[in-house]
Image (cartoon, grey):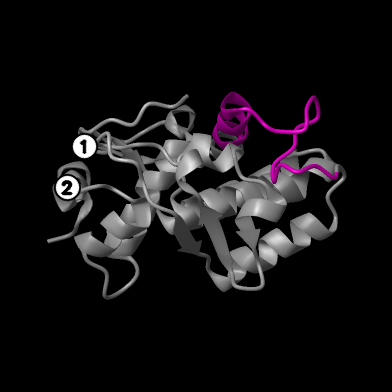
Amino acid sequence: METQTQEKATVWLKPEQVDQMRSATVEASASYLAARNDALIAALYDSGLRVAECVALNVADHVDLDDGVLALPAGIQKDYPTDRTPSYTEIELADETVRTLRTYLAGRWKDTDALWPSRQSDRMSTESVRNVVTAAAVGADVEPMTLQGRGDPEQVTPHTLRHSVAYRMLNVEEGHTFYDVRNRLRHATIQTTERVYDHIDRV
């Protein structure tokens, strides 16, 4: 399982880099996996889900495209950063993400309870999701932002997309505050959000 750190985010992407990754994964993936991989990256980047939460999603239980939300019961959320049990949460998706998920689900090659099946099993593992995301970054040759400047494509992971949600909300979309980022990423305290992301907020 991917480990969440309470230190500063060290790797993040700009929106256009995520778009490049999505294009690269569609071009490089087998035809029956292209829609899945595109939807996977889109959903991670829109929702800010942790990778373990993402692979736990079931179509019938957690995906409501009519309302445009992902439903996260407490059981699939990570208790972070305290031991308190998280509450049921609905994450609102962008219209474009809803369309991408509809297209993917309409043509899935494997009908499974899990939202993200793999070739070998009915549910992708966290490692297989990491492989898809990193391969997309390498295929697109994106150079992520890091604390030291530009990084290497191999540094991009699913958690990079979570950090990139914070970057997008604070620097690209208008009107968001650290409180909005906290709510989107479901941190228990605003102090956690500020500690992890204060350095990517433009001044």
Where residue 34 appears, as percent x and y from the top left, is 76, 46
Q: Residue at x 38, y 54 (%)?
A: 165
Q: Nearer the viewer, residue 123 or 87?
A: 87
To which quarter of the image does residue 133 belong?
Answer: top right
Residue for badge 1: 8
Q: Nearer the viewer, residue 60 or 187?
A: 60
Where is 22 relative to 7, above or below? below
* 130 falls in the magenta region: yes
Where residue 191 appears, as percent x and y from the top left, is 13, 47
Q: Nearer the viewer, residue 44 or 69?
A: 69
User: Which region shows up in magenta?
Assistant: 111-135
Label 2–label 1 contact, CB within 8 A: yes
Residue for badge 2: 199
Q: Earlier in the sequence, mark 2 or mark 1?
A: 1
135 vs 110, left or right, is: left
54 vs 173, left or right, is: right
* 105 falls in the magenta region: no
Residue count near mark 2 (Cα–Cα under 10 Å), binned few <14, some 14–19, many ≥20: some
Q: Is residue 190 visible?
A: yes
Judged by depth in the image, the label closer to the viewer, 2 or 1, is: 1
- Quadrant that contains the C terminus: bottom left
Determine whether the residue tagged by mark 1 lies in a helix, strand or loop. loop
